[in-house]
Image (cartoon, grey):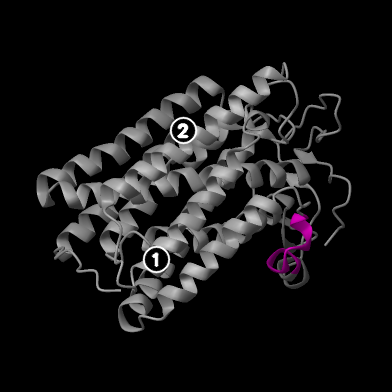
């Protein structure tokens, strides 16, 4: 793929990295008390992260021009849209492991750090492959088309977080205790350091995000192979993933047809990537932006209209966000079996999770 890269000075990379680290630090300090995040707080933080992502595009516009900014916005939009599918899986993982509400942000915080590292590696490897071996565009394109097809027609397949190979490997290698011990990932029991169920849930989140990272990075690489633009589009979209989860966790049941839109975007990205190595060449950025924006709007609007006509308000059924808990790990039994706790700060293991 012949896609010229921006001449980005090293100090810009360093400044951006420090900026991302500073934003993560502010977010960590704001939630160091492990309080349960409500919709209003999540919406406020989502507005902050979206403003940061859109604002960076304006900086690119002033620095490198409209074409560069348009390319960034296209990558940011498609990554933001695909991150909504992450939210569905996060809700499933939290429900499966009965993660108390107060500790979900901590898991997502460290999960985001892992997601950023994974995406950075995939970006540089994928961009280098596309630049050196043109035929990898066909492989990546075919992979995106296949992923889109699977998302559209296999979306309702049951997912079992405990069967993930990485989760199973961790439970075999690392001694684990099948309870929650407050917000700690590791504790000492009988003089032996063991992982808690909170750490197992974190591994499940990280393992599932690896698959999303491959999909999303490949989709943005279909727009541009410039590592700076791909990285910034991914980074600013992923930074708001935690707030997005807490905003949408009560509305997930209303996004009935959203996965069809996301599947279409993956297929579109795959076709776009393949066309870039044919006489057709790369599609214009305005066309790409228009397709992405229209697909997101139509799929969300279709979903909301369909659920409204069925009389559903999207807030009745739980999304599996886990049982509520206080700052000491005490889970309150809310009647649906999602995680009671005791005074010691240890929460009982959910059904189906064997002791390590």
Density class for disc 2 (Cα within 10 Å; few <14, some 14-19, many ≥20) is some
Q: Which SS does the magenta portion mostly show?
A: helix
Residue nearer the viewer, 26 or 286: 286
Mark 1 lies on residue: 273
Left or right of 110: which side holds 285?
Answer: left
Classify mark 1: helix, strand or loop.
Answer: helix
Classify mark 2: helix, strand or loop.
Answer: helix
Q: Would you place residue 347 above or below residue 65 in this image?
A: above
> Which residues fall within the magenta stretch?
160-168
Mark 2 lies on residue: 297
Residue appearing at x 55%, y 45% in the figure? 108
Q: Where is residue 89? Give x, y as percent.
A: 65, 47
The quadrant holding residue 299 is top right
Q: Where is residue 44? Give x, y as percent.
A: 42, 24
Report the residue that reaches farthest toward the front: 279
Left or right of 253: which side holds 220?
Answer: left
């Amino acid at each position: 793929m012949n896609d010229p890269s921006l001449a980005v000075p090293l100090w810009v990379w360093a400044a951006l990295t420090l900026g991302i680290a500073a934003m993560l630090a502010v977010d960590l300090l704001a939630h160091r008390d492990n309080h349960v995040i409500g919709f209003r707080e999540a919406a406020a933080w989502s507005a902050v992260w979206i403003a940061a992502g859109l604002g960076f595009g304006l900086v690119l516009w002033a620095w490198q021009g409209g074409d560069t900014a348009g390319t960034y916005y296209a990558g940011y939009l498609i990554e933001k849209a695909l991150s909504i599918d992450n939210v569905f899986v996060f809700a499933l993982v939290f429900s499966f492991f009965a993660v108390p509400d107060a500790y979900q942000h901590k898991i997502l915080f460290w999960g985001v750090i892992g997601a950023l590292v994974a995406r950075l590696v995939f970006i540089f490897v994928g961009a280098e492959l596309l630049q050196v071996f043109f035929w990898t565009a066909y492989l990546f394109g075919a992979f995106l088309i296949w992923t889109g097809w699977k998302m559209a027609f296999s979306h309702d397949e049951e997912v079992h977080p405990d069967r993930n190979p990485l989760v199973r490997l961790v439970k075999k290698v690392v001694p684990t205790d099948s309870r929650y011990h407050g917000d700690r990932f590791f504790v000492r029991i009988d003089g032996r350091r063991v992982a808690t169920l909170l750490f197992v849930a974190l591994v499940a989140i990280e393992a599932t995000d690896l698959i999303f990272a491959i999909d999303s990075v490949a989709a943005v690489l279909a727009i541009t192979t410039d590592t700076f633009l791909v990285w910034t589009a991914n980074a600013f979209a992923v930074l708001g993933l935690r707030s997005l989860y807490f905003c949408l966790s009560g509305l997930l049941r209303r996004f009935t047809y959203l996965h069809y839109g996301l599947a279409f975007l993956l297929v579109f990205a795959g076709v776009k990537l393949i066309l870039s190595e044919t006489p057709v060449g790369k599609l214009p950025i305005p066309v790409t932006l228009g397709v992405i924006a229209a697909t997101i709007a139509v799929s969300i609007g279709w979903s909301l209209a369909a659920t409204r006509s069925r009389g559903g308000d999207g807030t009745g059924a739980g999304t599996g966000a886990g049982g509520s808990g206080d700052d000491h790990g005490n889970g309150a039994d809310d009647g649906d079996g999602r995680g009671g706790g005791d005074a010691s700060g240890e929460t009982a293991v959910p059904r189906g999770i064997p002791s390590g």
